[in-house]
Image (cartoon, helix red, strand yellow):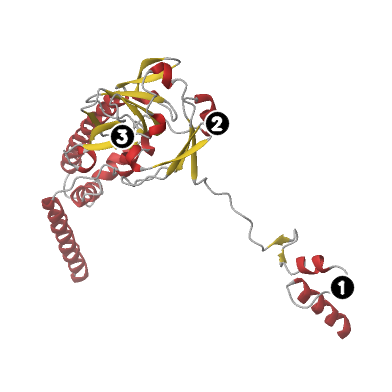
Amino acid sequence: MSSRIKEMVRVATARLGGEPSPRAGPSQPGRAESSRTARLGGGGASLRRQPQPQAPTVRTIYCNDREANAPVAYKGNSVSTTKYSVLTFLPKGLFEQFRRVANLYFLMISILSTTPISPVHPVTNVVPLSLVLLVSLIKEAFEDWKRFQNDMSINNAHVDVLQGQKWESSPWKRLQVGDIVRIKQDSYFPADLLFLSSTNADGVCYIETANLDGETNLKIRKALEKTWDYVLPEKASEFKGEIQCEQPNNSLYTFTGNLIVDKQTIPISPNQILLRGCSLRNTEYIVAVVIFTGHETKVMMNSMNVPSKRSTLEKKLDKLILALFATLFTMCVIGAIGR
């Protein structure tokens, strides 16, 4: 019996990475090595870590070719900055209101007023609280409606998009990654763009970045010399380059990527990138390729969610109400004990 126990221990040790099992002969080094992988459970699941799928670190964009970009399913160019939706307005709005200690305090008082021990009628507490909540929700709905209207006006703004060999006006929300667009003077960039060409002979344009960093002085951007000729729609329709660049991020002043055109790889620097929210100045028009759209643009990735507005007075009032509640609770406890 003891010899059988020793044999079982020897086999178990060999499976957990100890001495080799007697069954694995010297002529089978590969099998002996694989036996060092511990296996647990009836199915023999290996403890060796399996490679996990990771998001690609490079974005590949085919310029002026929607069919080639379709399998990737890039996000659209429509944006939304609203705080609520139709379904979330009531629950989220009530949650925001009852985050205020005053509303929560009067809600507790209203609930207690419905009990038989309350000396007052519930209406005296429920009606004022309901009116306050109603006015606050109407105010929140009005502000969010204004945000929605602003989003709609931006999403429905028009830009010239290359269709075949001519420019066609299209809403911003219909732009797709890889589209070639024409931006006219004093117009805003509808997405993050790769600057291809300009009406200026030296391939430069002037942009204003006041919406990004508050600076009103104009900045110069210069296109790659390889793409200076793609100004007219007939010539731009022949552009079939490939862009390999970084994934969307919130860094406004960095960009890493390459442009592959005519079997030639050309590095792209931030000097060729036009960010959404900037505007074109002192240039008749430029031609560019869309690389990031919608909420993947750098300006949108830097934007914050709509905060809850709370004044300093309201925060002080919350502390006073908490102190009042603690005082009343203490008086009730002392009165109950004394009685």
- The disc, 3 or 2, on the residue closer to the chain's N-terminal end is 2
**Most extreme residue toward the bottom, as rendered?**
2
Label 2 SS: helix
Asked if marks 3 and 2 touch (Cβ < 8 Å), the reply is no
Is 208 positioned to the left or the right of 31 in the image? left
Of the numbered discs in the image, which one, if any, rests on residue 276?
3
Q: Which residue is mark 1?
A: 26
Give the tally of numbered discs. 3
What distance separates the C-alpha of mark 3 from that of mark 2? 25 Å
Q: Quadrant of the C terminus?
A: bottom left
Amino acid on which the number 2 mark rests in the picture = Pro
Q: Residue at x 83, y 82 (%)?
A: 6
- For the point 20% across and 62% down, the residue is 329
In front of the other: 91 or 248: 248
Q: Who's the residue at 27% across and 24% down the image?
A: 153
Q: Is residue 126 left or right of residue 222?
A: left
Q: Which mark is residue 49?
A: none
Q: Which residue is mark 2?
A: 71
